[in-house]
Image (cartoon, rainbow, N blue to C red):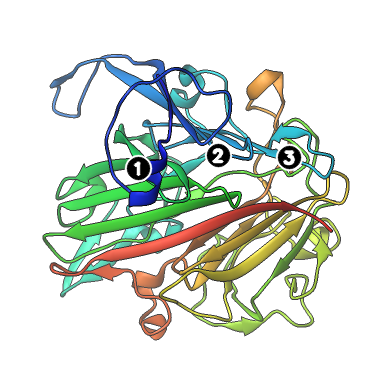
Amino acid sequence: MRCTLPALLIALGFTTMAFSQQPAKTGPAFEQEPYGKIPSSKDKSGKSIPAATVTQYTLINKNGLVLKCIDYGTIITELHVPDKSGKMADIVLGFDKLEDYLKGHPYFGANVGRCANRIGNAKFTLDGKEYTVTKPDNGQHTLHGGKTGFDKKLWHGEQLFGITGPGVKFTYVSPDGEEGYPGRLTVAVSYALTDNNELVIDFRATTDKTTICNLAHHSYFNLAGQKSGTILDEEAEFVAKNYTPGDDTLIPTGKIEPVAGTPFDFTKPKAMGKDLEKAGGKPVGFDLNYVLDKGSTYRPELAARVTDPKSGRVLEVYTTEPGLQFYTGNFLDGSNVGKGGAVYKQYSAFCLEPQKFPDSVNKPEWKEKSNPILKPGESYKQTTVYKFGVAK
């Protein structure tokens, strides 16, 4: 199904509804179609889970930018933006088929939760009670919500119209005890593709019991195109004079230190590959949290800017969050064969993930800067904007 956005609806602001019209030649437009099926299975208790259809949603703005996403994991599967000559390219890593996402992958294009990033030793304490949450089979710490996080759930999607472009809203209810987390968490995530060439991601959540909530978007970007080699020549600049150093397992020490004089200094534009070897790590590369100068804010403020010198594409990141996880695809090893046969090798893409600091729940010294605790009656709110342009 493809829909153009009537002027009346655009004037009225966001509203959720569905209708069908003749195919539009240009945006703003919205499409919805089946993407594949999740096979039937059984849960831990042996109860049968029926097969489910996964839907793909396509958003097109008036400038011809195209975003494709699915309700499985709220994954962004494609994002086509123009270069300095107007040539479009898909700049996010991903797969051609649902089956490849179901086999497992390093969070390509997903929104992760209920707690993004790492929780040390997969344990935390709330109101005097210790909770143990799930972790990868070969891991010491919880990563991105647990063994079966939000990236592996089937969400409910619905069309979303707005004053600035097409959108889609996803909702999911995480039951009390899922992956070991307390509380029934009701979550909504929306994507809007504005006519200012912005991808606006809005997160909302509420709970019926004290819990933790830290959601983040995890697209892998290559501004030259998802089949264009490494990102080491792409230049990054972060509005962050400090970072949270971590141990060998990437759990923060609890300290906040200046980036000045370290390989982690991106306060001025710098090629991602310039100090990559000096950054260390196993495997080598950047994988750390930056403390944004602005802190937590009510409205999204500038956090980062990345420029690809060859294509001229520019990505700016704005967010309400206090932290920014920067990752250069260090663990990509060629085992993931993506869209059009692209082989995703080490440093094929980067991630910029606005969020609370890693392991914040176990760092009381960060309570004023980065607090992931959500209580009944409170609302978790986060907005992140990825804005696309070209270098002037």
| Residue ranking furthest to the front | 8
Specify which label sits upstream in the sequence, 1 or 3. Answer: 1
Establish if 328 lies above or below 318. above
Q: Quadrant of the N terminus?
A: top left
Q: Residue drawn 82% across and 59% down?
A: 277
Whole-Å distance between the Cαs marked 1 and 2? 15 Å
Identity of the amino acid at label 1?
Leu
Q: Residue drawn 74% across and 36% down?
A: 225
| Residue placed most toward the observer, 134 or 294 | 294
Identity of the amino acid at label 2?
Asn
Q: Nearer the viewer, mark 1 or mark 2?
A: 1
Say how many tags the image has: 3
Residue 214 place in picture, x, y as percent: 37, 61
What label sits on residue 61 in the rendered view?
2
- Circle 2: is it few (<14), some (14-19), or many (20+) Cα within 10 Å? many
The answer, for residue 13, to whether it is visible in the render is no
Q: Residue drawn 83% across and 45% down?
A: 84
Residue 340 place in picture, x, y as percent: 68, 19
Instruction: Indicate left or right for 28 with 168 as reference.
Output: right
Whole-Å distance between the Cαs marked 1 and 3? 27 Å
* Tag 1 secondary structure: helix
The residue where tag 1 is placed is 9
Establish if 327 lies above or below 52. below
* Tag 3 secondary structure: strand
Residue 321 place in picture, x, y as percent: 46, 69
Instruction: Indicate left or right for 89 with 186 as reference.
Output: right
